[in-house]
Image: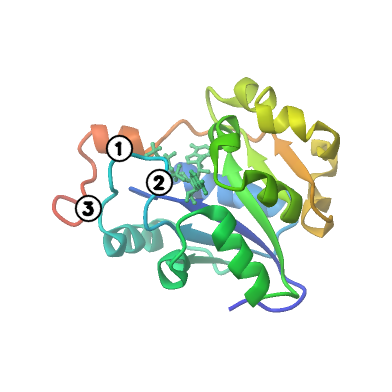
Amino acid sequence: MAAPGQVIGLLGGSFDPAHDGHVHITREAMRRFGLTHVWWLVSPGNPLKPHPPAPLADRMARARRVMDHPRVTVTAIEARLGTRYTAATLRRLVHLYPRTRFVWLMGADNLVQFDRWQDWRWIMENVPVGILARPGDRIGARTSRAARLYSRFRLPSRASALLGRRPAPSWCFVNVPMVSVSSTMLRDRGDWSGHVTETR
Ligand SMILES: Nc1ncnc2c1ncn2[C@@H]1O[C@H](COP(=O)(O)OP(=O)(O)OP(=O)(O)O)[C@@H](O)[C@H]1O
Ligand SMILES: O=C(O)c1ccc[n+]([C@@H]2O[C@H](COP(=O)([O-])O)[C@@H](O)[C@H]2O)c1
């Protein structure tokens, strides 16, 4: 699945459902962070979210319809590995693919609460992190605890293309054009409730 020399961006998410915002940040991340590939890690369930998402098979099917790019793979690898926490997933991937470079990708909203993630410092210290602007979260992200504690490891956005080749800790925030869609918005509009009412 991964080959030596590749620089693979990992976009973890509930994808409940996948939408144009995910597609947009994936394309921007490939361009800005010098990634050769991106994997969408469709999560068995975000450990911080109280309600379980739609069935994994439905979210995978929708994600594969929405994201059509030869260098993007939609995968349920966390379900296969039996991991739910990102640090555990990354530990396994780094072990399985020692000659591949990984970059953890996330929207700015996740940097705001990153210090609540399990072993978040391990993530910062072992895998470069690429952060993409999201409506409403740009300032909160840049002033977050994680951003402050790791401020001296921040790569300036003009050097973002180097992120995937740098040793951790290294993180970079890029101010990409923003798309305001969210899965919450789509669920609230009734556009998605797994296989039961999906119309697309
Ligand atoms: N419009 C967007 N702009 C920037 N980042 C986004 C956007 N939508 C999702 N992301 C990022 O994609 C990753 C996966 O997101 P997720 O599947 O939780 O979608 P979501 O729209 O945030 O869902 P929900 O509304 O249910 O919280 C996260 O890192 C999130 O920050
Ligand atoms: O590891 C953690 O503690 C942790 C806490 C919250 C979220 N995550 C991961 O962050 C990614 C985005 O989650 P979500 O639900 O906002 O799409 C997804 O891969 C989750 O598994 C991970």
**Secondary element at image label 2:** loop
Numbered label attached to residue 194: 3
Pointer 1: residues within 10 angstroms few (<14), some, or many (20+)? some
* Residue at horizontal 64 percent and vertical 20 percent from the top: 139
Between marks 1 and 3, how big is the CA–CA gap? Answer: 12 Å
Which residue does the image show at 28% across and 42% down from the upper left? 51
- In the rendered image, which residue does mark 2 sit on? 19
- Mark closest to the chain's N terminus, 1 or 3: 1
Q: Is mark 3 on a helix, strand or loop?
A: loop
Task: Say if mark 1 contacts mark 2, CB within 8 Å.
Answer: yes
Ligand 1 within 8 Å of disc 1? The answer is yes
Q: Residue furthest front?
A: 119
Q: Identify the residue at horizontal 29%, vertical 49% (top origin).
A: 53
Circle 1: element type: helix
Q: In x, y percent, where is residue 3?
A: 69, 79
Q: What residue type is labelled 2?
A: His
Separation (CA) of disc 1 from disc 2: 9 Å
Q: Which of marks 1 and 2 is nearer the N terminus?
A: 2
Cα distance in 3D space between marks 3 and 2: 14 Å
Residue 129 at x, y percent in the picture: 69, 47
Badge number at residue 186:
1
Query: If the image is split into quadrants, where does the N terminus sit?
Result: bottom right
Residue type at mark 3? Gly
